[in-house]
Image (cartoon, rainbow, N blue to C red):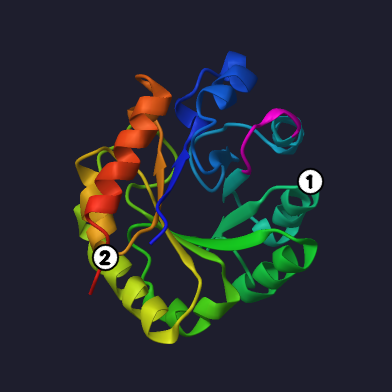
Amino acid sequence: MVTRINPSILAADFANLERELGRISTADLAHVDVMDNHFVPNLTLGLPIVERLLQVSPIPLDLHLMIDDPDRWAPAYAEAGAYSVTFHAEAAADAVGLARRLRDIGARAGIALKPGTAVEPYLDLLDEFDQVLVMTVEPGFGGQSFMASTMPKLSLLADAVRERGLDVWLQVDGGITEDTIAQAAQAGANTFVAGSSVFNGDPAGQIARLRAAAALHTHTH
């Protein structure tokens, strides 16, 4: 079982993003939160900055679009060269159509679910996506506490992916630390977004510790 650690640059020094990306070069991907101040009550960065980050990042970019109307805006991020583009189920008009378009452009297509969003409507559509992101906090702000109440949803996904033999990454984002990563790994996650717990110390050491903690608790249901 591959364990992926994707540090969130939401916790990085925004004045020195190229340097900060270099500090997480031992990670699998860099998680970039795009917030539009509409879908979520916060504003971060958009396409021009992402295009520049793509030019300087030592690792691929894992984009998480917390934006309205991703059907219109998401393809541009794939065209820019993002490795993975995840949009929110709650914001997309045609999630399957958008995922197919992202794949056609050449990006991995991900769908994100807020803590209160049911996963059942998407279980029969899993082969249309390369990644499902189960939000373990309410999207919009960094530094929140992990919501263990989202773990049954993750377990449902993990069982469905395994039973159907699919190659779908199961990602968690929000409050991921050495403690909570064990819960998420046991429930079936294999791709972990961590912000504060990586950037508030020695990133390389933190990435290694998170990777080890997740590997110890891999889902085996």
Taking 168 as reference, is 49 left or right? right
Q: How many marks?
A: 2
**Which residue range is magenta in the image?**
55-60
- Residue 219: image quadrant is bottom left
Q: Does residue 118 lie above or below 124 as drawn?
A: above
Identify the residue at horizontal 63%, vertical 69% (top origin): 93
Q: Does residue 155 lie above or below 201 as drawn?
A: below
Q: Are marks 1 and 2 in contact (CB under 8 Å)?
A: no
- Residue 128: image quadrant is bottom right
The crowding category of the residue bearing disc 1, from other C-alpha atoms within 10 Å (few below 14, some 14 to 19, many at least 20), is: some
Q: Which element is circle 1 on? A: helix
Give the residue pinned by disc 1.
80
Residue 66 visible in the shown view: no
* Front-most of residues 78 and 68: 78
In the image, is residue 58 part of the stretch drawn in magenta? yes
* Residue at the far top in the pictured view: 15
Q: Does residue 145 lie above or below 105 as drawn?
A: above
Taking 189 as reference, is 76 left or right? right
In the image, is residue 57 part of the stretch drawn in magenta? yes
Coordinates of residue 62 in the picture (x, y in percent):
58, 47
Quadrant containing the N terminus is: bottom left
Give the residue pinned by disc 2.
219
Q: Which element is circle 2 on? A: loop
Taking 203 as reference, is 14 left or right? right
Identify the residue at horizontal 56%, vertical 44% (top origin): 38
Q: Of the residues shown, which amino acid type is indicated by label 2?
A: His
Identify the residue at horizontal 49%, vertical 30% (top origin): 10
